[in-house]
Amino acid sequence: MSKILKIMSIATALTFSAHSMGGETYYGAGLAHLDIPIDGIDDEMLDATVTSLHGLVGTRFNETFSGEVRLGIGISDDNNLDDDGLNLKLKNYFGVYAKAGAQISEIIYPYVVAGYTRGKMEVSVLGDSESGSEGDFSFGVGVDFSISETTKFNLEYMNYLDKDGVELSGFGLGFSKAL
């Protein structure tokens, strides 16, 4: 938990320093449906899915570029693996990202996003569990839909992790609000 507090403290400090330089600060939240392929017995691939909830704090530096810090937790375990005696939990994840986009209409703002994510998962097999953390380069695409001058909804696809046999990617739906 102390790592989470440190990350949030750093995010807050970065946000206030960016805000003092003229950037627009925003906050938000999102839900994501994430796929996690797992190597099964006899090289069979098992597909796990989890749902996550994340909060974010960001700064829009200009019309094109912004930066974000996200902190998320798993809110549902995988339901697809129970028949195989497996259970998968996404414990938490955090990341720092840069976004670049273009306002193509008053409402639509498509963007690309890239950065770094670190996540912690737990796998249980017939009652024995093991957890581990992994970090990797992350990337994705999305589109913001403005519903007012300060509030946006977004649809996004992110590849959060793909390292050492651990993959975490999927679609999310979220919102953000400028301060």
Image: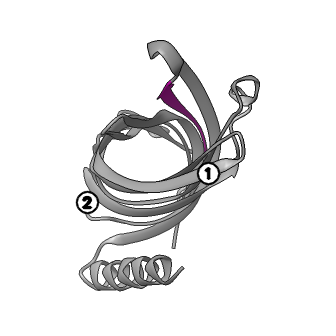
Residue at (55, 53) in percent of width and height:
130
Q: Which amino acid does label 2 sit on?
A: Asn
Q: Main secondary structure of the magenta part?
A: strand
Is 125 or 23 nearer to us in this picture? 125
Is residue 152 visible in the rendered structure shown here? no
Q: Where is residue 153 in the image (x, y as percent from the top left)?
A: 58, 45
In the figure, is residue 108 to the left or right of 86? left
Residue at (25, 60) in percent of width and height:
62
In the figure, 162 relative to 30: above or below?
Answer: above
In the figure, 78 relative to 63: above or below?
Answer: above
Q: Quadrant of residue 173?
A: top right
Residue at (75, 23) in percent of width and height:
83
Local packing at callout 1 (Cα closer than 10 Å; few below 14, some 14-19, many 20+) is few
Number of the label disc, if any, that sits on residue 62: 2
Local packing at callout 2 (Cα closer than 10 Å; few below 14, some 14-19, many 20+) is few
Number of the label disc, if any, that sits on residue 129: 1
Is 53 or 155 nearer to us in this picture? 53
Is 46 or 51 nearer to us in this picture? 46
Q: What residue type is labelled 1?
A: Ser
- Where are the magenta residues, as a range? 32-39
For the N terminus, the image quarter is: bottom right
Circles 1 and 2: CB atoms closer than 8 Å? no
Q: Where is residue 4 in the image (x, y as percent from the top left)?
A: 48, 76
Callout 1: helix, strand or loop?
A: strand
